[in-house]
Structure formats: structure tokens, C-alpha cells
Image: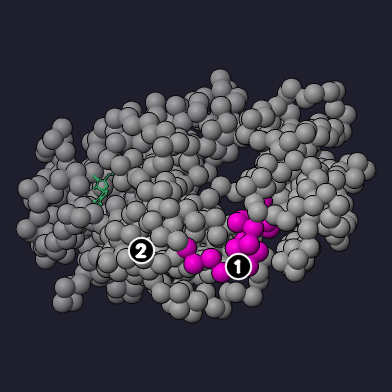
Amino acid sequence: MAGLSSSLAIVLLGSGALDTARRIQSRFPESHVHGLAHRVVADIAYDDFGAHMRELYRAGVPIIALCSAGIVIRALASCLSDKKAEPPVIAVAQDGSAIVPLLGGTSGVNALAREIGTALDVAPAITTSGELRFGQCLLAPPEGYALADIEQGKRFVSDLLAGETTRIEGDAPWLDAAALPLADDARLAVRITPLAVDDEHSLVIHPRCVLAWIGDDIDIAERVRIALRGRGLSPLALAALIAPLHLMTSQSLSDTARALDVPLRFSDAAPIDINGIALQVHDAPVDAQSIGRARGTLTVIGLGPGSAELMTPAARAALIAAEDVLGYETYVRMASPFRDDQRMHITDNREELQRARHAFELASEGRRVVVVSSGDPGVFAMAAAVLEALDDGYASHPEWRAVKLAIVPGVSASLATAARAGAPLGHDFCVLSLSDNLKPWSVIEKRIAHACEADLVMAFYNPLSKARPWQFDRAIEIVRRYRSAATPVVLGRDIGRPAEALRVVKLSELKSDLVDMRTMVIVGSSTTRVVGDWVYTPRWYE
Ligand code: SAH
């Protein structure tokens, strides 16, 4: 899955390493710099180094840690027993003077270390013997190829190190650069083949060159396995599963592709009339992206109020996987950095429906589309606009229904502001937008009055704008009829952003000069209290 695992984590503890981190990052545009919150301004903030490292490691994310090898080893010690799921882990000295590949011998750690070495102009400390001798890791073939069996591979490398020679059978262009001890009459062989061969004297590498075209979605995993076995092919040689377009929304099909660990593509251009399953074996690895198209995805995410640390990992993963990112300029900028291969579509804040339609159009071409909102996407933001567009286009755009739609929640401004102030939303509350762009002002007045009558804490979004200069004062006038002059009011401006400002005033002091469009206003209920610098609403009620 193209989630976090497609990216690379450059993890640092202090700002002393930031320079080195950015130098490494410039070589890997898909990477993110992870920094300890409050100490380093990074792309992604974490609180606990050990926990963060283990989370990355378990998610299979390649890690470049800018600290001592010892710190890295201690952090990961408890999760090292499962050798299969081992992403590359590299320790790099803070000043960039040393590069030590630690883990991930079979997932390309040495190749990665060499690339970092080029970026920093230092030779990495390669310690794996096979690699030193042959110039590259035989057990980590390039994209498009899969190693049949790691244990068999290790035996093969030790045999070579012990002085054996080898032949190469099949086409392995990347091995031309390796300094292998070749001999035509060697007992051992590197065999590049899609066939499932059982040969203890070979290093078997499967090119992903088999396409499985299917006509339906019933018991596919089992039937594909049987079909492969029938032709003597290894499941690791499978490059993609290709189904007709009308099966795009089939859940069992996407589960099957995941189980077989191959991309799922859709095309009505099957090479033959398929009645069941047709396997097509090519001479060389096939790039699945070049066949038909994927099921498009449309993910509506909330970025949180502004800072990277308040963005959820799910939202971050969606951004990393995105091909197209749509949103209002400020929010798209908040979601950066982007890679060169990602397209940004910046639109005016008010063109929400148009943006939502555009998102569906892109996604129904098979693209991975992300629409960004600040805070939570479901709170006065894009998630509802996207569903309105779907509702409108349901009959006229059947292709929109095939799009895989997901909404990823975020920390809404009211929640972020409340947390900074204490717990003003500790008891029943409501959220109201004071914008009368999309609803009549009379409805707003009525809701405020009812919320006051119900003694709810009120969180006001969109309190004021240049186009709506008088509404806020009018709203407060209504509140004053119900609440005492001493009622605490929390004003959070640019919460989670560099210009963050928090104020607590009494209802009697509240006036429109204190707020603008970047302010969240939380008006307490009859029980909301102040203790020291904190504002809270107790859980109990008299
Ligand atoms: N979807 C957003 C809200 C969009 S409405 C969310 O869930 O937060 C925009 C309003 O949200 C602004 O007028 C302001 O009242 C509030 N807001 C958004 N971000 C804010 C921030 N960082 N600090 C304070 N208020 C914010």
C-alpha cells in the first residue's frame, strides 16, 4: 500500500542535526524530517523518541536516525525479533560525518546508505560481507524482481564467500555491475525465472512478469493460485491482477489483491475472451501502472488547526499517497511539502462545490486525490461539500460512485482552542457558525437563543468578517440576555500556528474588536469556571 511506508523518515533529536537532515532530504524528495516537538521545527513532530521509532519501524518505514547507533539500537531493541519485516535503519552522525547501516540488509539498507553517502560526501560504514565483496546486495533485487527465498539466498551468498563460482541464467541486467565470480560450468546459479523452481544450488529471483486477467470476483485468490500452479509459475512472479471496469467497487477483489500482495488494475481490454482467469507471461517485469487504471480514491482530510503535531498520522499518510491535492491556498500550503510528482490544485475559498466536482472528476480517472480542509473536514468544511457534489451528480455521473471515498477526521479549531484554555467543553456544548453566507441570519439568532436557553457552552466558528461586520455584536447581544456578565469567554486566534494567541475575557468585556475570521470564540455556560489560568466546565450539574 502506498501509505507511510512509501516515504522515508529522517528522525532527529535536536536542531543541531537539522542541517544534515535537510541535506539528506534534498536527495529523497519523498522523505519527511521528524523532530522532537518543541525542540525542532520539522515536517512531523513526535513526543517520545523510542515510541516514535518503534511505530515507524513496525509500519515498515525506512529510518535514517541522526543520532548515535547506540540510541537507535536501544530504541528498537524490543521489536527486533521478527526479521522478516525489517525496513532499512541507518544511524547518521549529527554532523553528517558517519553513516552506519544497522538493519534491513535484505530491504536495501546498503543501497540507501550509499545514496546518503553521495549526498553527504562520506563513505558509508558497510559491514555486510556479501555486499563488500560483490559490490551490491544479491538478496535485494531491484524493483520488478522478487527474491524467492531469503534462507536459500543467504546460503548461496555464504557459498560464494567460501569460494564457489556461479552462472547466471536468465536476464539480470543489474548484476552486470556486480563483481560476481562467474564461471560457465559453476555448480551454483543465479536463476531469473517466473517459474517456481526448487533448486538448492540456485539463487532464484522472480521477475514480476505475469498478469492475471480475471472476468469475475468469485474466489479469485484461490483460482489465481491454482492457475499459477498449473503453469508452474511462482506467485511472486505476479505483477498485477486485472479486472473489468464494472468490478471496480468489489470489496472481495480489493481484499484478494491485498492478500496476493499485487496491484489491482481495471481494464476492459482483456487480451482474450476471459472466461474465468487468463495468465499472460511477459519476457520482462511488467509495470502495473502501465496497464488499464487503478480505482480512483478521493480522501477528504482535516489538517488540524495548523501545526504538524496536531495533524493525525492518517491525514499525513493520505497526503504522502496523494497524486492530486485540492484546496484553498492557505490550507494547501499548510499541507506542504509536496513532491514534484504531486499536483496541487489551488482554488478560492468560496468555490467549494466546484472544487468537490473537480476532485470527483480527477478521482474517476483513477487518480489518488486528496481534498484538504483545516481542522476537521466535517466541521463547516469540505466533507459536506464533497457529499453535496456526490448527491447532485449521483444520477448524472455514475463513474463518481466507483470512486473510493474516505473522510479522515482532524482536530477541529474548537477542540484545539478548548485544550489550550483548559476544558471549557467539559460538559454539553454546541458548535455554531456565525456566517450567514449559506443560511439566513434569522436562523442563527434563533439557534443562539435556544442554545443559551439550553445552557450549552457555545463554540462560535466564523465569528466575523469584513463582509459581515455587525453580526458578531448582534450575536453577543442575544447571549447577554441569558448569561451573566462574568461568564468566561475563551478567544483563540491562530491556535496551533506561529501567531497563536489565547485570551480569556468576561462576557461583559466581549466586543467585535477582539475577534476576526481567524478567531474561535467559546462562550461558557452558567457553570463554566476559571481556576488560575485555566477555564473549565465541570462534568457535574446542580
Ligand atoms: N473545518 C474547520 C473550521 C472551518 S470554519 C475546523 O474544524 O476547525 C473557519 C473558522 O474556524 C474560522 O473562522 C475560525 O473561527 C475557526 N478556526 C479555524 N482555524 C483556527 C485556528 N487555527 N485558530 C482559531 N480558530 C480557527
Direction from residue 66 to residue 8 in the image, left or right:
right
Q: Nearer the viewer, residue 184 or 191?
A: 184
| Up/down of 501 relative to 391, above or below | below
Q: Secondary structure at mark 1?
A: loop
Q: Residue 253 falls in which quadrant of the image?
A: top right
Q: Which mark is residue 96?
A: 2
Residue type highlighted by circle 1 = Thr
Q: Where residue 236 sits: x, y (%)?
A: 76, 49
Does the residue tagged 2 have its C-beta within 8 Å of any atom of ligand 1? no
Q: Nearer the viewer, residue 346 or 431?
A: 346
Residue 78 drawn in magenta:
no
State left or right for residue 252 relative to residue 395.
right
> 121 or 6: nearer the eye?
121
- Badge 2 crowding class, 10 Å Cα cut-off, few under 14, some 14 to 19, many 20 or more, is many
Could you tell me the amino acid type at mark 2?
A: Gly
**What's the magenta region?**
124-141
Q: Is residue 34 visible?
A: yes
Q: Could you say which disc has been placed on residue 128 in the image? A: 1
Q: Is residue 129 magenta?
A: yes
| Percent position of residue 152, x then y | 79, 63
